[in-house]
C-alpha cells in the first residue's frame, strides 16, 4: 500500500509508528511532506520513510493520502493538491469540524474521502478513532482505511452526525483524563507518596479501570458498585465527587467541546 502523509507532526508520527509496526505498510511505501525541515527529517530518521517539502509529490506517489495538518490549514492545502488528486486516490482527514460536505466543496470534484477523528493515545498504540465516509468510498476502500486506522489502536465506522460527539468523548478526552491523573497524584503526594510513584499509582489505576470496562463487558456503574463497600472509604469518596459536581462537570465539558467542534 502506497501511503502518503501531508503533515508529519505528532499525530502523523503516531500513526506511522503503528502502521509500520503492524506491517500495514513498509517504510519504503510511505512518503511524508512537511514544509518544516526539522519535522520531516525527524520522521525520516525515526522510521526510514521518504520525505519531501512538496505536498504534490506525496499525492503523485501515494494511493492513500492522509491530511494530517491543523484544521485552519486544510483549505490552503487542498487548494494546492486538488489538481493532482484523482478518482483513484483515497483521502483520509483527521480535522475536527471539517465535514464531508465542506471537504467536497474544497476539492471541487468527486473525490473518495474518509473523515476521521483519532486521538493522541495513538502514540502508544491505543488510539480510538471514529470514521465516516462519503458516497464515493467503496466497501473495499473503507476496509483499507480501517486497516490503517486499526494499526494504531481501534477504529469504529459511525454516521457523520456523531462525529462532533466523538471529538468530545474520544478526540479531546485524553486531556480530561490527564487532568484527573494529575489531580489524583497531587492528592497522593499530599498523603505522603513521592511524586513519581503517585503518577504511577494514579495512571495504572486509570489504565486498569478502563481495561475492566472493555474486557468484562460490565456496566461502569456495576463496576463502581463492586468497589464501594457499605460504610467504606470508596463510597465516601464517590459521595464527595457527586457533591462537588464531578459527573456534571464532565458532561458539561464534553458538551462545550462538541459545541466548539461544530463551529470549526
Image (cartoon, grey):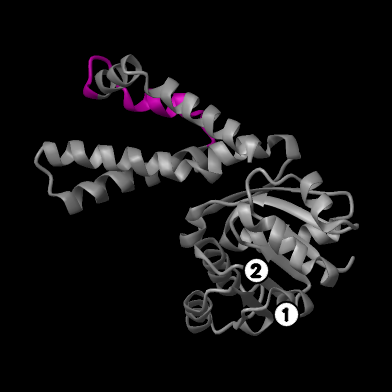
Q: Is residue 197 left or right of residue 144?
A: left
Circles 1 and 2: CB distance less than 8 Å?
A: no
Q: Residues within 10 Å of mark 2 (few under 14, many from 20)?
A: many
The residue lying at 63 percent from left, 41 percent from top is 264
| Residue at horizontal 62 percent and vertical 75 percent from the top | 32
Q: Which region of the structure is painted magenta?
A: 217-233
Separation of marks 1 and 2 at Cα, in angstroms: 10 Å
Q: Which residue lies furthest to the left in this view?
A: 192
Indicate the position of residue 1 as horizontal and vertical percent values: 74, 75
Q: Is residue 1 visible?
A: no
Residue 77 found in image quarter: bottom right
Q: Name the residue under label 2.
A: 6
- Place of residue 144 in the rendered image (x, y in percent of width and height, measured from the top left): 76, 63
How many residues crowd around disc 1 within 10 Å: few (fewer than 14), some, or many (20 or more)? some
Q: Nearer the viewer, residue 9 or 105?
A: 105
Whether residue 180 is visible, yes or no, is yes
Amino acid at each position: 500500500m502506497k501511503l502518503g502523509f501531508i503533515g508529519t507532526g505528532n499525530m502523523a508520527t503516531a500513526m506511522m509508528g503503528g502502521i509500520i509496526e503492524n506491517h500495514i505498510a513498509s517504510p519504503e511505501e510511505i512518503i511524508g511532506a512537511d514544509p518544516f525541515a526539522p519535522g520531516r527529517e525527524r520522521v525520516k530518521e525515526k522510521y526510514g520513510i521518504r520525505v519531501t517539502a512538496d505536498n504534490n509529490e506525496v499525492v503523485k506517489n501515494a494511493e492513500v493520502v492522509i491530511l494530517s495538518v491543523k484544521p485552519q490549514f486544510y483549505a490552503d492545502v487542498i487548494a494546492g493538491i486538488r489538481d493532482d488528486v484523482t478518482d483513484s486516490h483515497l483521502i483520509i482527514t483527521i480535522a475536527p469540524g471539517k465535514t464531508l460536505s465542506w471537504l467536497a466543496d474544497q476539492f471541487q470534484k468527486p473525490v473518495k474521502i474518509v473523515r476521521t477523528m483519532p486521538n493522541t493515545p495513538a502514540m502508544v498504540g491505543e488510539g480510538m478513532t471514529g470514521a465516516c465516509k462519503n458516497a464515493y468510498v467503496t466497501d473495499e476502500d473503507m476496509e483499507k482505511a480501517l486497516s490503517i486506522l486499526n494499526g494504531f489502536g481501534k477504529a469504529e465506522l459511525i454516521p457523520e452526525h456523531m462525529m462532533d460527539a466523538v471529538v468530545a468523548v474520544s478526540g479531546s478526552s485524553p486531556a480530561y483524563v490527564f487532568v484527573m491523573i494529575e489531580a489524583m497524584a497531587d492528592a497522593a503526594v499530599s498523603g505522603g507518596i513521592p511524586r513519581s510513584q503517585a503518577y504511577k499509582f494514579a495512571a495504572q489505576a486509570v489504565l486498569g479501570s478502563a481495561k475492566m470496562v472493555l474486557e468484562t463487558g460490565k456496566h461502569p456503574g456495576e463496576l463502581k458498585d463492586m468497589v464501594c463497600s457499605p460504610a467504606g472509604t470508596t463510597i465516601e469518596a464517590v459521595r464527595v465527587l457527586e457533591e462537588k459536581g464531578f459527573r456534571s462537570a464532565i458532561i458539561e465539558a464534553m458538551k462545550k467541546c462538541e459545541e466548539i467542534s461544530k463551529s470549526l
